[in-house]
Image (cartoon, rainbow, N blue to C red):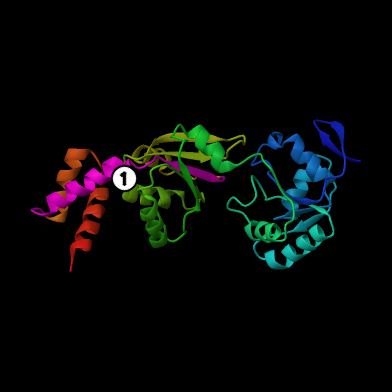
Amino acid sequence: MVEFMLEGEKFQSGAVEPGLYIVATPIGNLNDITIRALKILAGCSLIACEDTRTTGKLLKHFGISTKMLPYHEHNAERAGKKILNALSDSKSVALVSDAGTPLISDPGYRLVSEARKKNFRIIPIPGACAPMAALVASGLPTDNFQFAGFLPSKTAARQKRMQELVDFSGSLIVFESPNRIHACIDDMKKIFGAERNISICRELTKLHEEISTASLAQLAEKIDGRKLRGEIVIVIEASRQEQVIDVGKLLEELLENMSLSSAAAEAASLTGINKRELYQRALQISDRKKP
């Protein structure tokens, strides 16, 4: 039997069956850990983690002394072999990230893929997940969504990625660094249009949690001059596919007799969509028609 602590009380847990356990850990508030996760972490043979210092603090808080093995993108091949060898020896291995659910913008995909190929048992232990927490609290539609991870850090690459996502028919979820949030929002205004609603979710589950949902124009003004801290999740309102199709046809008709700028201005007055966004669409249409 092994022990762990929860709110000052000792609990016991038996040994964990062999297999690879994908264990979600808190994204900020330690009270979000699940009882099942604690039992797995306390009873497994080995914990594979991104940073032993970060995971070590979590284990110390709950009185867990299981051996840790660093597993991150820089040592994935070498450490992955050790983990697969442990599984071959009928050991139980818990895979954790620094925070949240492993493999969601975190290392682990290759390990799980290799373990699956070798027919090792793989067991998900669900729990905290920042993208899901942001989505359900945003007030934006949840029936259809896409998680796109971190946007590129360079402006040109970031705008290109946004262009690829602009017409998605569900809610979009992305991560962003506090150092790039202002540049990111500026790019979103250009690509998605200032009227598109988004939700900026910061420091989720922590003391200074902040969730703001409004149009891009309104939120750009709200955060202007502010130095935001902590991890940030952005949820972006779905594109209206019917509107996109209609606007495309409208711009094609207007471009037959108008310049790019005039066509964008006229379409903006008819649809209420941001003129810059319409100009970019008109430019794409014009480029496609060039011989």
Where is residue 159? Give x, y as percent.
38, 57
Which stretch appears magenta? Answer: 230-258
Image position of 121 (left or right of 252): right
- Front residue of 137/254: it is 254
Furthest toward the front, the residue is: 119
Q: For residue 59: magenta?
A: no
Total numbered circles? 1
The percent coordinates of residue 15 (x first, y second) are 87, 44
- Visible residue check, residue 159: yes
Residue for point 61% across, 54% down: 106
Q: Relative to 194, say whether 177 is above or below.
A: below
Examine the rendering and report whether any part of residue 264 can be seen.
no
Residue 114: give x, y in percent of width and height. 68, 61
Q: Residue at x 16, y 55 (%)?
A: 260
- Out of 42 and 7, give the one closest to the viewer: 42
**Crowding at mark 1 (Cα within 10 Å: few <14, some 14-19, many 20+):** many
Q: Position of residue 16 (x, y in %)?
A: 83, 45
Tell me: 126 left or right of 223.
right
- On the rendered image, what quadrant is the N terminus found in? top right
Instruction: Name the residue rendered at 41%, 61% in the picture.
Output: 157
What secondary structure is found at the residue carrying circle 1?
loop
Q: Amino acid at mark 1?
A: Gly
- Residue 259: image quadrant is bottom left
Residue 242 covered by magenta stretch: yes
Quadrant into which the C terminus falls: bottom left
Most extreme residue toward the right is 1
Residue beneath disc 1: 193
